[in-house]
Each structure stands twice: as C-alpha cells, then as structure tokens.
C-alpha cells in the first residue's frame, strides 16, 4: 500500500515512490497555490472561535482578537508541519492545520465558569499548552499503536471525514436558513451555488497544467464576483476591521493551571491525536509518501508543538484541515512548500484583521457550490484506499458501514447528545471523532488476531530498522 509502511521499507525503497512533496516551486506558482489553501483554511478555522465567542458571550473586540489568534496559530502550525523549523520534529508534508471543533464545548465551559474572560482565557491557555506538551512527550509511544490503523481503518476514516463534512455543503447553500428543516433554499443562493458547481466541473475538465491546479481558487473568485454583482456580499465587517492587530502571548495575562479543567483538555488532545493520525495517513497516501514510524512520530510531535504554541498565542488546540486534503487531490500539486506559503499567509492574516474579514465575507452559497468537490474527493480517496482491503471471510464491510452511520448522526441531529454528560458530548458530538473511534474499536474487535500478528511483525521490523537508521539520509 502507499500509506503505512515500515521503516525498513524506507531504507530499501527510499526512492521507490515519486516524492513530489519536496518539489520547490517558483514564486509565481507557489503564491496562488498557497492562497488557495489559505482561503479554505481561514473559512474552516473561523467557525470555531465564532461559535465559542457566541456561546460564551464575548464582546466584538474580544471575538476579533480570538479569530485573529486562531488564524495566526493555524499558520504557525502549518509551517511546522511543512518545514523543518524545529529539527527532528516535522513530518515535512503538506498538512494545513487549524482549530479543532472538538474543543468548542470544553473551551465554552471554561470561559463560562471563570470569574472573568481574562481568567477564562488564562485557564484555556495553560490547559492547552499542557495538553500539547503531553502529546509531544508521548508521541514516540503512540507510534507503537500504528498497527491499529490498517487500510480498512485508514480508508474508513477518510470515508467518515468526507461524509461527515458533506452536510456542510448543504448548510452553506442554505445560508442563514441552515439547520431549519422547514425552510427552502433562496433562489439566488441556489443559482449561484449551482452555477459555481457547473463552472468548476467545466474548468476541471478543460483547464490543464498550472491553471488546472488552481481550479478551486478560480471558481471561488468567479463566484465572489458573481455574488457581488447580485448584492450578496456584505463588506461592513471588512470596513470595521482594523488594519493591524498584533497577536501576542499573554494578551489576557499569564496562563493558569486549573487541575479541574485539565483532564477535559487532555481527553480532547487524545481524541485529536486519533483524528490527526488517520488524517495524516490519508495525506501520506495522497502525496505518495511513505508513513514510516519516524513520520508517524514526527506528525504527532508537530501536533503537540502546534498545540503548545496555540495555547501560548491565545488560540485553541489545532487539527489537520481535512478540507485542504481535498484541495491536494483536486489540484494535483503535492508540494509542501505550497502549504508552507499558506502558513505564512495565515500568520500575516492573523496580524491583519481586514484580510481575515475579507475572506470571511465570501457568501456561504459560493462555498456550497465548491463543497461537493472539496469534500467529495476525500470520499474518492477513501475508495482508492479501500480497494486494498480484503472483504472475504471477515466483517470489514460492517466496520465501514457502522462507522459511517455513527459519523452521520451528529451531522443529521446536532443536538442528539445534548442530554448526555459533557465527556460523551465531546467524543460523540463530533461525527469525525466518533466515526474514527468506531472504526478503530470495531477493527480491534473483529480483527484482533491479525492485529496481534501485525504488532509482533512491526516490532521485529522496527528493531531491524533502528540498526540502520543512521544510514538513512534525512530530508531538510
């Protein structure tokens, strides 16, 4: 398979796969490719701080700072994943990162229970930083669980990601009427979403080379222009936003340790490690880069460091943006320097609230027209991985079906788990997390014997690999 292999394979087949992730691009290509990732990353990142702000009753100024902090942290995290900024910690892959939806209920609870907003953010910062340190320290031990992620789990996880995200497309098309099942779509919203949908299909077929790689960005720009002509774009937030606003550590004061709050953040961190493990394997498969033990460990080290820095800069725990995974597959450009450029743009955007406001001004129906392509390709990637799975004499089909079913529940009924304890809401309220955990658990239950054999085999290979690690050239 392309995705998960042993370190021994890295030594013997180091040049077996065409590693396009290290291809350096000219500035004229890397800027628009990076901007394409930036737009989608910002649109994927800002819902988390906006939802938290609305639920915790933050002021407009506090909300703007929170959004800028999350965007800044997303950029920093993406750079850490793509470039060897901190030696021996980066997986060197095009993995755009940003705010994790799973932290929403935990952070809202912390802010509401604190004596003030400042104290609440101090506790959030301290708990997030410690959770990141926890992730970094256990990264090398977590890789021993790699055998729990065979192709059936990786493919199912990608299938879960795609199906759990697809409903966002419908919500975007509905705009302000989203989640109200009694409403029908506005005619303008429908025609612009459908028009962008058809336009993207046409340019995907006829545009080749570099322009073909920018199909999402081109469709987005055309959709934005059409929306402006139809009077669907509100530039008021852009006008009101500041030109410059520095995102600095300790904006709300020194971080605080709260032993009562910390366990919730650690639990969300562990769930985030499960999610990023699966997503990173999908990325490795798409970019045709081998997922060695070293790669697995460095991916989690990057997650840990990114979480630590996110807490330091008043943001929340990050995760790998699955939306950008779809862009990788659609654009056919796998260079990690494109997401590194996006990371730099996100960092700059974190200092320029007007830029973030402009991106967030893109009407939701325009995104709805593109969502089918972005999320649908993820499902296609899952099918490609699942072709490797043996379905004879086992329950692998059941694993896939049940996992997707569990993942769809929160998307269909967002308040389904509201009456359950907070821990249950944190885990199962996210379709991505609940679906991934279901796939892992069912695979362990049905394929226990084969997993034990795989663990034993992996241990032997790892022991052999350690003897020759010094001979393997590292990529800087």
Image: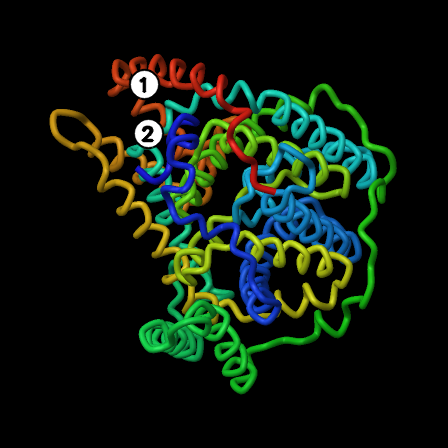
Q: Nearer the viewer, mark 1 or mark 2?
A: 1
Q: Residue 14 sits in which quadrant?
A: top left
Q: In the rendered image, which quarter contains the N terminus?
A: top left
Question: Height in image: 289 above or below 196?
Answer: above
> Circle 1 sits in a helix, a strand or a loop, which is it?
helix
Q: Are marks 1 and 2 in contact (CB under 8 Å)?
A: yes
Judged from this view, the residue extending furthest toward the bottom is: 229
Residue at 36% across / 27% down in the picture?
A: 440
Q: CA distance from mark 1 to mark 2?
A: 9 Å
Residue at 50% across / 83% down in the picture?
A: 226
Q: In the image, 135: left or right of 425?
A: right
Q: 256 or 280: nearer the eye?
A: 280
* Residue 67 rendering spot, x and y as whole percentages: 70, 54
- Mark with earlier residue (1, 2): 2
Q: 385 or 273: nearer the eye?
A: 385
* Residue 196 rendering spot, x and y as whole percentages: 41, 75
* Residue 126 rendering spot, x and y as whole percentages: 76, 30
Q: Residue 358 sits in which quadrant?
A: bottom right
The numbered dot on residue 150 is: 2
Q: 29 or 205: nearer the eye?
A: 29
Question: Badge 1 is on which residue?
Answer: 454
């Amino acid at each position: 398979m392309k995705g998960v292999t042993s370190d021994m394979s890295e030594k013997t087949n180091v040049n077996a796969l065409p590693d396009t992730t290290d291809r350096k691009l000219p500035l004229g290509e890397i800027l628009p490719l990076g901007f394409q990732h930036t737009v989608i990353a910002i649109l994927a990142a800002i819902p988390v701080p906006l939802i938290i702000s609305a639920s915790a009753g933050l002021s407009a100024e506090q909300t703007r700072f929170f959004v800028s902090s999350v965007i800044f942290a997303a950029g920093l995290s993406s750079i850490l994943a793509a470039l060897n900024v901190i030696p021996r910690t980066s997986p060197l892959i095009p993995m755009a990162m940003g705010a994790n939806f799973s932290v929403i209920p935990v952070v809202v609870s912390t802010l509401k229970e604190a004596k003030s907003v400042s104290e609440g953010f101090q506790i959030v910062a301290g708990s997030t930083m410690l959770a990141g340190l926890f992730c970094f320290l256990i990264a090398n031990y977590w890789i021993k669980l790699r055998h729990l992620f065979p192709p059936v789990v990786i493919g199912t996880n990608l299938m879960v990601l795609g199906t759990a995200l697809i409903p966002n497309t419908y919500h975007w098309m509905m705009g302000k009427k989203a989640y109200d099942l009694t409403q029908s779509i506005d005619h303008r919203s429908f025609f612009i979403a459908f028009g962008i949908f058809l336009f993207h299909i046409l340019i995907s077929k006829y545009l080749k080379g570099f322009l073909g790689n920018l199909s999402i960005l081109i469709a987005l720009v055309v959709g934005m222009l059409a929306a402006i002509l139809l009077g669907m774009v509100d530039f008021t937030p852009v006008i009101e936003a500041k030109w410059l606003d520095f995102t600095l550590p300790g904006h709300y004061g020194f971080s605080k340790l709260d032993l009562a709050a910390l366990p919730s953040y650690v639990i969300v961190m562990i769930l985030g490690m499960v999610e990023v493990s699966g997503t990173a394997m999908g990325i490795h498969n798409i970019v045709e880069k081998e997922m060695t033990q070293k790669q697995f460990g460095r991916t989690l080290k990057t997650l840990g460091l990114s979480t630590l820095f996110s807490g330091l800069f008043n943001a929340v725990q990050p995760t790998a943006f699955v939306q950008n995974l779809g862009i990788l597959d659609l654009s056919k450009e796998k260079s990690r320097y494109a997401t590194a450029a996006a990371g730099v743009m996100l960092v700059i955007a974190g200092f320029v609230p007007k830029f973030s406001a402009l991106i967030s001004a893109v009407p939701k129906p325009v995104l709805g027209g593109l969502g089918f392509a972005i999320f649908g390709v993820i499902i296609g990637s899952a099918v490609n991985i699942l072709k490797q799975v043996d379905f004879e004499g086992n329950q692998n089909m059941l694993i896939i079906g049940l996992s997707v079913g569990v993942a769809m529940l929160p998307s269909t009924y967002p308040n389904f788990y509201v009456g359950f304890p907070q821990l249950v809401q944190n885990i199962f309220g996210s379709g991505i997390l609940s679906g991934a955990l279901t796939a892992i658990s069912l695979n362990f239950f049905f394929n226990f014997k084969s997993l034990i054999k795989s663990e034993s085999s992996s241990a032997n290979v790892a022991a052999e690999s350690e003897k020759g690690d010094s001979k393997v050239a590292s990529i800087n």
